[in-house]
Structures are given as C-alpha cells and as structure tokens.
Amino acid sequence: MSGVICMAQDAIIVTGIEQYQEALKKMQSDNPATRKVLQSVIRRAIAEARKNVVKDARDVLDNDPRHAYKAVRNSVYKQVLGGQINILPSRHRGAPTDYRKQMTMTAGQRGGNRRPRSLRTMQLDSYEGADRGFILRFINAGTSERKIEFSSDSRRDLINRGSRGGNVEKYGKTTNTGSRGALRTRDWFGRSSAFQLDAAANRVAEEIEALLQQEFQMI
C-alpha cells in the first residue's frame, strides 16, 4: 500500500502512511530483532575484513612456519553496533609446542651452535599460531638497533677461534658479541586494517540499504 496525499480547502491530508512509520520503527536499532540482524551483518563484514588482513600478514612474513598470521583477531561489539580487528596480545594462551628449527649442518661440519637450547629459547619456540602476535607487532612497529652488550668472561680465551681466525680483541671480553640489526617500521597493519574496515563499512551500509528496500517493498 502506498501513501495518498489529498488536498482539502485549507489543509493537506496524508493517508496510508502508517505502514511506512511502522516499517521505520521496526528497523530502528533499539528493536531487539533488528539489532540481531544488524550484528549479523556486521559480523560477516568484519570476518571478511579480517580474512583480507590475514592475507596481507602472510605477504609481509617471509617465512612463517609457526603461523603467526593467525594472531590477526576480530570481534563484534555487544554494547554498540560495530567491530574491530587487532593484533594485540590475547588473554589466553594456546597449548605450547615443542618446535625445533631444522638444522642445515652436515656431519663433521665445523661451526654452528653447539650450546644446548636455553629455557628462554625453548619458551619462545613453544609459541604457535595466535600466540605469535608479537612477531606481527615487531614487523609492524619495527625495532631499535639490537646489539649484544659486552661483559667480562675469562672463559672466552678457551673458545676455539676457528680455522680462519677472527677478531682476537673481542675474545676474552664477551661470551657473545655482534650487532643484530634493526627492523624498519612498516605499519602494514595500520594501512591494511584501515583499508579493509573502510570496505567493511561500505558493505554494511549496502546490506542495510537492501534490507530497508526489502522491508518497504512488502508494504
């Protein structure tokens, strides 16, 4: 049914518009049924955005044997209509793993790390999947120059310096030396999430418009 406008002598009388008013009232976000539908629309859009951000995460990770890309998380708000994507630390940790990096040394080869794995190394290697979000945050924000500090250790003189010699001055001064470099800031997550959430907002708007048109066509 459509509204009808009639001209009276000194007034304009509108009839048949009650159905439209009821339809608009039904589509308001404070209506429990409508709110549930809107949250479902938002949930689908956020899930699609998260999937695309995961693709970008996998692109910036040159090697990801422990699936750090799974640390990209999403959620839909309960109190307000909306959602978000993040790479923040999770409140809950998954089960630890016994990951060991595959060694490439051949039998009889000199060099390499002969020291046993430290507890800290085993702890870091035990993180898997969504628990490795710190890798994504390092790549996103970058790091400062990382160096091993000098420390006195008299045992250093006993270490085999190798068949080709080495920097003799540093032996006896430290158990480990060297620069580990720095990671440059990429801000890949900031760019990717902003673009994908903007696309998600457009998808939500299109679906809501389609729902409104569908509701009015039933009048």
Image (cartoon, helix red, strand yellow):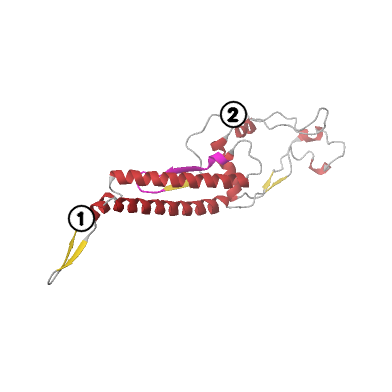
Quarter of image, res 159: top right
Per the image, label 1 sits on a secondary structure element best described as helix
Q: From the image, tell me which residue sits under label 1.
A: 18
Q: Residues within 10 Å of mark 1 (few under 14, many from 20)?
A: few
Using the image as rendered, state which of residue 46 and residue 68 is in the foreground: 46
Residue 211, percent from left and from top: 35, 50
Q: Nearer the viewer, mark 1 or mark 2?
A: 1
Q: Amino acid at mark 1?
A: Glu
Q: Amino acid at mark 2?
A: Thr
Q: Check the image and name the residue furthest to the left.
A: 9
Determine if residue 123 is in view.
yes
Q: From the image, tell me which residue sits under label 2.
A: 97
Q: Is residue 74 magenta?
A: yes
Distance, label 1 to label 2, CA atoms, is 63 Å
Q: Check the image and name the residue furthest to the bottom.
A: 10
Q: Residue at x 79, y 39 (%)?
A: 171
* Residue stretch rendered in magenta on the structure: 69-82
| Image side of residue 89 versus residue 61, left or right | left
Using the image as rendered, state which of residue 122 and residue 200 is in the foreground: 200
| Image side of residue 119 versus residue 178, left or right | left
Vertical order, 180 against 158 (above or below): below
Q: Residue at x 27, y 47 (%)?
A: 31
Q: Residues within 10 Å of mark 2 (few under 14, many from 20)?
A: some
Q: Residue at x 30, y 43 (%)?
A: 33
Per the image, label 2 sits on a secondary structure element best described as loop
| Image side of residue 47 versus residue 126, left or right | left
Q: Residue at x 71, y 31 (%)?
A: 102
Quarter of the figure that contains the N terminus: bottom left
Determine if residue 77 is in view.
no
Residue 145, percent from left and from top: 66, 49
